Amino acid sequence: MKPVEKPFTAEQAERIKALVLFEAPTLVRQLSNTDTPVSLDEAIDAAKEIASQIKPGMMKSEALAIAQTKFDEMTTPTKCKKCGGEMVPGQALLQTFASVMPDFPGDKVGITLSPGGPGELVDVLKCRDCGHSFTI
């Protein structure tokens, strides 16, 4: 049976706020090798914003959702990797590929990929300048 989630007490809320602030350098390390690295000041500001929203009576799942939302905001690229243009939310058709038959005699599987399905509509970030899309 799954344990019942209990709301934070005032003491637990304060401890969690302190922990969020303490973990800011970890966020810098985690994002250092990504497309969206952050400075320690940015991580501390983000941690302060998260901590300010944690209140007594809040459920753990609510606190985690607040932290995840902020993390997603920080890790969503705002500049195009190709031209440096502004990225905006959009949708694109993701092609499905299939390898139908072997390419050479003796092959057990095919290597050449061909369009093989209806595709799938996916959320992307699209560059306003060059039109290049990146999946989210």
Image: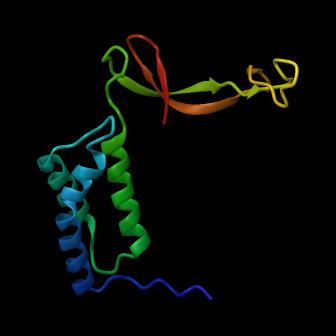
Q: Is residue 51 left or right of residue 7?
A: left
Q: Is residue 45 left or right of residue 78?
A: left
Residue at (49% x, 22% y) in the render? 133
Q: Position of residue 9 (x, y in %)?
A: 29, 86
**Residue lying furthest left in this view?**
41
Residue 108 location, quadrant? top right
Q: Report how many numbered discs are placed on residues in the image.
A: 0
From the viewer's perspective, is residue 59 above or below residue 95?
Answer: below
Residue at (88% x, 19% y) in the render? 105
From the viewer's perspective, is residue 34 above or below residue 131?
Answer: below
Residue at (38% x, 83% y) in the render? 7
Residue 63 location, quadrant? bottom left
Pick the residue in front: 129 or 55: 129
Q: Position of residue 131 (x, y in %)?
A: 46, 14
Q: Is residue 6 left or right of residue 38?
A: right
Residue 88 location, quadrant? top left
Pick the residue in front: 73 or 84: 84
Quarter of the figure with the N terminus: bottom right
Q: Position of residue 26 (x, y in %)?
A: 24, 58
Residue at (21% x, 79% y) in the render? 15
From the viewer's perspective, is residue 66 above or below residue 8?
Answer: above
**Residue lying furthest top in this view?**
130
Q: Which colouring convention does the figure follow?
A: rainbow
Q: Position of residue 114 (x, y in %)?
A: 76, 19
From the viewer's perspective, is residue 118 above or below residue 62?
Answer: above
Pick the residue in front: 117 or 97: 97
